[in-house]
Amino acid sequence: MKMSEMSGHTQDQAARGGVRFVSTGAAIRSRIPVSADGNFPINKTLIGVLALGLAIFNQALFWLLAVLLAGRGNTVTAARFVIASVALGAVLWALLAVLQWRATDGGNAADKGVLVLTAALCAGSVWLVSPVCGLAAVAVLTAWSVRGLFGKPAGA
């Protein structure tokens, strides 16, 4: 039996030094070091956050392009952008949910409630082919996940 199993911690928790974060935002903040003058290095975590932001922007852009194209009568291309926005929203929701679950080791009741609510929105997006539901699900889960990103670090 491994030491981490004997203490009741998961291997992932043991690898992080037994730290359980309140949110994905707090986990991100702990992985991006900031110097005294406010500079920070470019690392994998920062690149991942920027890529996630770009993907969320593209989800909204696909939806807006679909609306624009549908208004101009190009319904076939508009439908493709709607499907792209819905599919990207489902993938982003799944990615955010996994990141939030791993960062908080399952989280608390509020985390689970937000995951269930946004899962319902995401499922509605896929079922109804509604990019608005998918964008709402990703926006709510993103806002909930990054709530620990801003503010003072713990112990400061």
Image: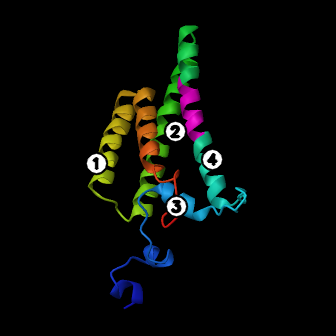
The residue tagged 4 is 51
Q: Earlier in the sequence, mark 1 or mark 3?
A: 1
Any mark on residue 88, and which?
2
- Distance Cα–Cα, label 4 vs label 3: 24 Å
At x 59%, y 35%, the residue is 57
Query: What is the image's colouring?
Result: rainbow
Report which quarter residue 104 is drawn in. Answer: bottom left
Q: How crowded is mark 4: few (under 14 residues within 10 Å), some or many (20 or more)?
A: few
Question: Which residue, given by chain and number where applicable, does mark 1 sit on?
Answer: 113
Q: Is mark 4 on a helix, strand or loop?
A: helix
Q: Which amino acid does label 2 sit on?
A: Leu
Q: Give the range drawn in magenta.
A: 55-63
Q: Which of marks 4 and 3 is nearer the N terminus?
A: 4
Q: Do the residues labelled 4 and 1 touch (CB within 8 Å)?
A: no
Q: How far across and down, in percent of the image, does residue 151 sit?
A: 51, 52
Q: What residue type is labelled 3?
A: Pro
Question: Quadrant location of the N terminus?
Answer: bottom left
Residue shown at 57% from the left, 28% from the top: 62
Q: What residue type is labelled 1?
A: Gly
Residue 153 marker:
3
How crowded pointer 1 is (Cα within 10 Å; few <14, some 14-19, many 20+) is rated as few
Crowd tier of the residue under label 2, counting other residues whose Cα lies within 10 Å: few below 14, some 14–19, many 20 or above: many
Secondary element at tag 1: helix
Q: Which of 14 and 155 is in front in this view?
A: 155
